[in-house]
Amino acid sequence: MLRRKDLLGLYDCSAEEITEILDVATEMRTFLEQDKRSSDLLKGKSLITLFYENSTRTRTSFELAAKYLGATEVNISVATSSVQKGETLIDTGKTLDAMKTDFIVIRHPMAGAPKLLAQTVKASVLNGGDGMNEHPTQALLDMLALKEKFGKIKGLKVAILGDIKHSRVAKSNLFGLTKLGAEVWMYAPQTLMPKEIEKLGAKIAKSREEAIEGADGVMGLRIQLERQHGGLFPSLSEYSKFYGVKDGLLKYAKKDAIILHPGPVNRGVELTPSLIDGKTSVIEEQVTCGVAVRMALLKLLAEYREKNL
Amino acid sequence: MKLLIKNATLVLKDGEKKSDILLEDGKISKIAKSIDGAGIKGCKIIDGTNKHVLAGLIDMHVHLREPGFEGKEDIESGSKAAVAGGFTQICCMPNTNPVCDNAVVVTYIKHRESEVNLCKINPIGSITKGEQGEALSEIGKMKEAGAVAISDDGKSVMNSNIMRLAMEYASGFDLKCLCHCEDIDLVDGGVVNEGYNSTLCGLKGSLRAAEDIMIARDISLAESLNVPVHICHVSTYSGVEIIRSAKARGVKVTAETCPHYFTLTDDIITSFDTNTKVNPPVREEKDRLAIIEGIKDGTIDCIVTDHAPHSQKDKEVEYNLAAFGMSGLETSFALSYTNLVKNGQITLTQLANIMSANPAKVLNLQGGEIKEGAAADLTVVDLNEKWIIDGQKFLSKGKNTPFNGYEVYGKVVCTIVDGQIKYGG
């Protein structure tokens, strides 16, 4: 049973909670294969997506998850909201609460913003990504994709390559995967590797080969093009040459290994096009898993609200 | 006005002594084993039984926010907080609006000091005009109006040649540069210490090196020019070591730290409580321990508060957007006593020196010592009183403290400035 009003990150979640989310998400994944995807599980409930950063898949996925379960869904576009007029996050939260919102999905460029919101509102807050902190639903969908393929998480080896330092996806995956008994290996330019991440359970590889050796899952992280101008690496072509995941590297992984990417992909930078479109890629399946995971979370949080609030 | 404190323990420069102390006409007129108050006309008697009397505490690093940011603090509320914290004398940093970069603002602050009439206020002028790091402020004129030092606190003067010229020029007026040490390019937007906890929280970190590089630069300038320099709010173990080795080879460097640097580590940032956001950031356990070592061996001369009051709206926002700083005047003595003296790291006499005599010496201020003939600036404390910190009860407008709920020892019971009771009694 999920024991929380909000889902802010996987760092605070127990292995049992994560397992339960994935179990319910597996049911939802089956539900998504139906011809008519409609349920009245969340009928009469409302969900607001409050995005301070751009998003295609996270936002759409939450919106569809809510609609498939019968909830009313509204999205707030930052450009048209009072956020631009300087309203504080706390005041925005109070306003949304006053509209009797059950769920707020927030994406924000600053770490800790979802927590600040959650402390303010009665609604359940779901973190859709906060700065360099966490992106729990992305990690959960990655875990669901791995679980679908291998039937379990425990004992898997997952390699994460790319801009670890700025990646909330890498961190949430690290927390979630290690809690369920997987090994997480990381490889990145030294300028894109956060300090002391090994103390959070990551294994640091000395080469791409070492990271990928025997891996069940290989995840490339998106390189933000603006990082190059900050001097974190010299050029995209140098990045791709030394840190990109290329076809030839996959021979080090397990035979049935899968390729993951949180998207959107810079083709030819973090992953070669042939890997993105190849048989081993589950990038599209990840997107479907994303809807299932978010449906599962809404269901579980709604149950918590029913019983506790 | 005559005041007699009876049966108290005086904390003198070289140790504690049970004694009575008589204050007349703003001066300490007599220190003796037993003084008979009944025989002195119009004399108010304070019972000092089980109390300690310290030379009035001096905080040489305070932000009073006036003029310009009265929503955060003003000279009156800041002074009330100061005397409640046992401070008889404070020095205020120039990052106001307008910046205290000319004699007019210095004069204004001195005028407000006499209007408010609580503690003594010594303005610190800015090093550069507008704290922009480009052109020198009118340092001589500011000194004439009452400034006791210069500082661009809040930022470093990034141009090393401007800093050189400032130190050189100010030395001609016997004024020290108080150096806020932070290489702003290296900080690069960091808001917390860079390390395990910044990685855990996803908050952008700032390396120790960002502070250390500027400590080393400013010491190096002082050494090359053979002028004195003072390093503000040291937070890193490595910074302590840089200062220690400079002192060992005779550089005229003094340094200060704040209670949060010897009390807290960056474990507290994981709460995302914006009251933990301060510049320089609180660091790790090895830094905390090194700061204590630095206090013990005299590498660090002074404890200051870096009192940085902020309004609720400055702090009740996302961590990145929150203002840096902690409201410190009303907790400094208790935190220092609890975390340095009560646990046996230093003696009460050492603490009194670090919080009074040393700052007076660093800035050439009157005060800092209990002796006959000196100004009657005294702080009376009850060391046995245990209390729980609650920012909402502060007299300062800034309720922003990371110490809410902390149990501490040492309560200021009376603050006397020039023989007048300004707090308690």
Image: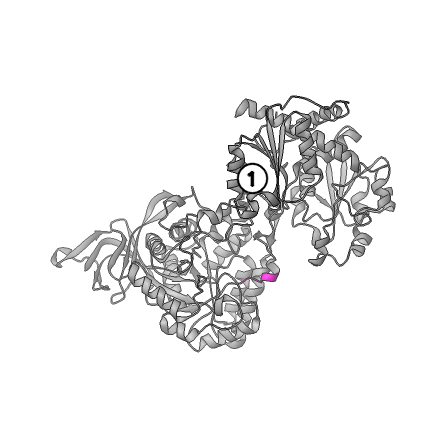
Counting from the top left corner in percent of width and height, residue A117 is at 54, 39
How crowded is the residue under tag 1: few (<14 C-alpha within 10 Å), some, or many (20+)? Answer: many
Write down the quadrant of residue B15 in the picture: bottom left
Counting from the top left corner in percent of width and height, residue B404 is at 43, 43
Under circle 1, the secondary element is helix
Counting from the top left corner in percent of width and height, residue A259 is at 80, 39
Q: Using the image, determine if residue B266 lies above or below residue B106.
A: above
Q: Is residue A155 visible?
A: no
Q: Using the image, determine if residue A220 lies above or below residue B170.
A: above
Question: In the rendered picture of this protein, how many numbered marks are placed on residues?
Answer: 1
Given the image, on which type of amino acid does mark 1 rest?
Lys
Q: Nearer the viewer, residue B330 or B375?
A: B330
Q: Nearer the viewer, residue B230 or A133?
A: A133
Give the residue pinned by disc 1: A115
Span shown in magenta:
B181-185
Q: Nearer the viewer, residue B18 or A120?
A: A120
Q: Chain of mark 1?
A: A
Residue A168 located left or right of residue A217: left
Q: Is residue A226 visible?
A: yes
Counting from the top left corner in percent of width and height, residue B420 is at 24, 58
Q: Nearer the viewer, residue A234 or A64?
A: A64
Quadrant, the N terminus of chain A = top right
Q: Please say which color scheme the image uses.
A: one colour
Residue drawn at point x = 59 percent, y = 24 percent: A44
Residue at far front of view: A80
Residue drawn at point x = 69 percent, y = 36 percent: A60
Residue B260 located left or right of residue A80: left
Residue drawn at point x = 27 percent, y = 48 percent: B50
Q: Using the image, determine if residue A9 lies above or below residue B30.
A: above
Can residue B383 be found in the magenta stretch? Answer: no
Instruction: Tell me which secondary structure the magenta stretch mostly adopts.
Output: loop
